[in-house]
Image (cartoon, rainbow, N blue to C red):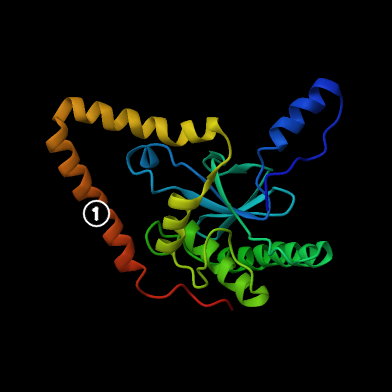
Amino acid sequence: MPLSPLSGGGNQGKQHAMRKAMLVPRTAVVWCPIPLITWVFPFVGHVGLAYANGATSEFAGDFTVLDNAVGTLMFGRQARYCAVARPNDVPAASWDELVTAWDQQIGKTAVVFSQENYSFITNNCHAMVCHALNAFQRQTGVGLERTAVRDWNVVRLAAHVFFYGRHISVYHAARTWLPWSAFVVACTLWLGPSRFFTGYAAASAFAIAGFVLVDMRRTREPQ
């Protein structure tokens, strides 16, 4: 579903609110950078689920699922999103039913993960999103835009957001990539291109391999 506006109120205030609202993903998976971590490894970030009204839900810690204000996640404003695909032949009434099913599934998933321990490696924000996606797709047959994946796990989700996630705006693209670019330039000048890129490639491969090995067990089935 594309970015869409909220209703606002009053002249300049209304126009400002509308401009901000235009940058709010709805019925989507949403992503934001994690300070320091994403600046070094841009494929690592924090994800949540956006309701049809733009509010978000995210797995934030042990027995903690946060319901946030429109457009925000635990680490700040959303920067990228992957929308739920709207089939071309779906009439408005049927799409409304799908959106309702999406919102309901977010609520069900929030209940499940509010009873679970959090682990950055094995049971994290991506795991909650995968759980919701798998359950929603089994119920409706509808998935995310720009992919045919029907069995989500942490690695597949992270890769999809990294390669296919849409930046909400030029500002949010800069917010995602400028810190990493500055890190790369600084380390290259300090260590030299060969030493830096060899070490960086090894560290990235190690991090990715760790997540892949942990995620070889299938994402939990919807209850």
Relative placement, left or right, of 95 versus 174 is right
* Image point (82%, 38%), residue name: 7
The amino acid type, in three-letter code, at marker 1 is Ala
How many circles with numbers are drawn on the protein?
1
Q: Residue at x 49, y 73 (%)?
A: 151
Q: Which residue of the protein is positioned furthest toward the front in this rendering?
A: 89
Q: From this viewpoint, which residue is outermost toward the top?
A: 12
Label 1 crowd (10 A; few <14 / some 14-19 / many >=20): few
Residue at point 58% right, 40% down?
Answer: 168
Dividing the picture into quarters, in which one does residue 19 lie?
Answer: top right
* Looking at the image, residue 81 lies above or below residue 122: above
Q: Nearer the viewer, residue 15 or 91?
A: 91
Query: Residue 76 at what x, y percent from top left?
Result: 55, 38
Residue furthest out toward the right: 10
Residue 128 locus on image (x, y percent): 53, 63
Above or below, 110 against 164 in this view is: below
Q: Quadrant of residue 213?
A: bottom left
Considering the image in quadrants, where does the C terminus appear? bottom right
In the rendered view, does 136 fall on the left or right side of 90? left
Residue 13: image location, x then y, percent: 80, 24
Mark 1 falls on what kind of element? helix
Q: Position of residue 179 (x, y in %)?
A: 38, 31
Establish if 44 lies above or below 170.
below
> Which residue is depicted at the point 71% across and 61% down?
103
Q: Which residue is mark 1?
A: 205
